[in-house]
Image: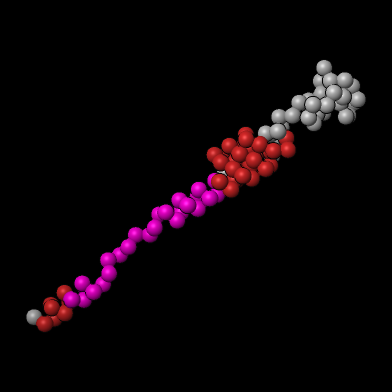
């Protein structure tokens, strides 16, 4: 009888198993998505596509940052096809008036 009493006390002394915290991994995923959105914005901002780059970085993660490098929303010269910076009236490459 003493052995059963000791066995019952031993099982009460062991703490129940705990489940791993799921909040840590969710926080890490959210942190990666926010960092990717910021990196996507910075990657495309100089080509006038910052918000598109931020959205691609947030929804596609690090692959969206790489894709944001290809976005270019600047206007093109109709004659030579080079990219124009700002509201310039003359193309810096072919020196023709912008239409």
State the residue at coordinates (56%, 46%): 34
Residue 39, visible in the rendered structure: yes
State the residue at coordinates (54%, 46%): 33
For residue 38, which quarter of the picture? Answer: top right
Against 4, is 31 above or below?
above
For residue 15, which quarter of the picture? Answer: bottom left
The C terminus: image quadrant? top right
- Residue 50's spot in the image, x, y percent? 66, 36
Task: Name the chief secondary structure element in magenta.
Answer: helix
Which residues lie in the magenta part?
9-33
Whether the magenta-drawn stretch holds residue 21 is answered as yes
Residue 81, visible in the rendered structure: no
- Residue 70's spot in the image, x, y percent? 69, 36
State the residue at coordinates (83%, 26%): 88
Q: In this view, does 13 lie to the left or right of 89?
A: left
Whether the magenta-drawn stretch holds residue 25 is answered as yes
The N terminus: image quadrant? bottom left
Q: In this view, does 86 lie to the left or right of 2?
A: right
- Residue 3's spot in the image, x, y percent? 13, 81
Which residue in the rendered view is the most extreme toward the bottom? 2
For residue 37, which quarter of the picture? Answer: top right
State the residue at coordinates (73%, 35%): 47
């Amino acid at each position: 009888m003493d052995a059963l009493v000791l066995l019952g006390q031993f099982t009460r002394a062991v703490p129940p198993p705990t489940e791993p915290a799921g909040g840590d991994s969710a926080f890490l995923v959210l942190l990666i998505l926010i960092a990717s959105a910021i990196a996507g914005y910075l990657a495309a901002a100089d080509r006038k596509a910052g918000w598109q780059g931020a959205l691609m970085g947030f929804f596609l993660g690090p692959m969206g940052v790489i894709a944001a490098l290809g976005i270019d929303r600047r206007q093109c010269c109709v004659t030579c096809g080079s990219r124009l910076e700002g509201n310039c009236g003359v193309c810096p490459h072919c020196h023709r008036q912008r239409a």
